[in-house]
């Protein structure tokens, strides 16, 4: 892993994997084809689809929140003001990244940190993690990272299909 190039694994960087374009189109809900600048993460996909289709969602086990209100009115605030991402460093250690509308903070398993001002430095050239002027922003985003003991465990594969699947 290298911080200067933001390499998390051999194929993708933190920045590349966080900048997925999420496009949900349902003309009856969002006929204006407007964009929202609200930060969202992939946890919102399932609850949004169940909300839009009327399919009952499970009562537990889902952490995401529906984006229906944002689809209906792109100026509406997202259900939460940040997007949280977890990556694995190839050694089974978690790399956490939190993005708000204005900043992105990344905490590596070895304690390394990155903080970027997305408004004034959209290409993320200047790491502000050690800049005292950004200490409050860094603390706010760092406090959004889960602190449970499970936070550094890689995900468990749940597929148990046989060879004839």
Image: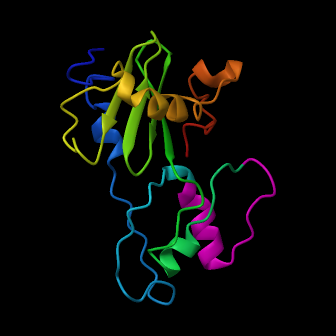
Depth check, front residue: 72 or 44? 72
Q: Is residue 2 above or below residue 27?
A: above
In the rendered view, does 126 fall on the left or right side of 148? left
Name above or below for residue 91 compared with residue 155: above
Q: What stretch is highlighted in magenta?
A: 44-61
Q: Where is residue 55 in the image (x, y as percent from the top left)?
A: 69, 73
Residue occupying the point 48% across, 31% down: 136
Determine the image quadrant of residue 58: bottom right
**Quadrant assignment for the N terminus:** top left
Q: Left of 106 or right of it: where is 59?
A: right
* Residue at x 44%, y 75% (from the top left corner): 74
* Residue occupying image coordinates x 40% and y 17%: 90
Q: Does the magenta stretch include residue 154?
A: no
Q: Can residue 153 be seen in this view?
A: no
Q: Is residue 53 visible?
A: yes
What is the x, y in percent for residue 37? 38, 63
In the rendering, at what x and y percent does residue 105 appear? Answer: 41, 32
Q: Which colour scheme is used?
A: rainbow
Give the vertical position of 152 relative to 53 (above or below): above
Q: Is residue 52 magenta?
A: yes
100 or 72: nearer the eye? 100
Q: Quadrant of residue 123?
A: top left
Image location of residue 122, percent across then percent down = 22, 45
Q: Examine the rendered structure and indicate whether residue 115 appears above or below residue 89.
A: below
């Amino acid at each position: 892993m290298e911080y200067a190039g933001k390499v998390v694994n051999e194929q993708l960087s933190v920045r590349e994997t966080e900048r997925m374009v999420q496009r949900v189109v349902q003309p009856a809900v969002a006929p204006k084809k407007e964009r929202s600048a609200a930060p969202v993460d992939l946890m919102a996909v399932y609850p949004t689809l169940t909300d839009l289709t009327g399919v009952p969602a499970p009562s537990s086990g889902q952490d995401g929140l529906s984006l229906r209100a944002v689809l209906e009115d792109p100026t509406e605030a997202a259900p939460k003001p940040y997007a949280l991402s977890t990556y694995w460093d190839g050694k089974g250690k978690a790399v956490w990244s939190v993005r708000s509308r204005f900043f992105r903070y990344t905490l590596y398993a070895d304690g390394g940190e990155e903080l970027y001002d997305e408004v004034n430095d959209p290409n993320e050239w200047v790491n502000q993690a050690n800049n005292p002027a950004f200490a409050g922003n860094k603390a706010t985003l760092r406090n959004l990272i889960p602190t449970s003991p499970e936070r550094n465990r890689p995900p468990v594969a749940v597929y148990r299909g046989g060879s004839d699947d």
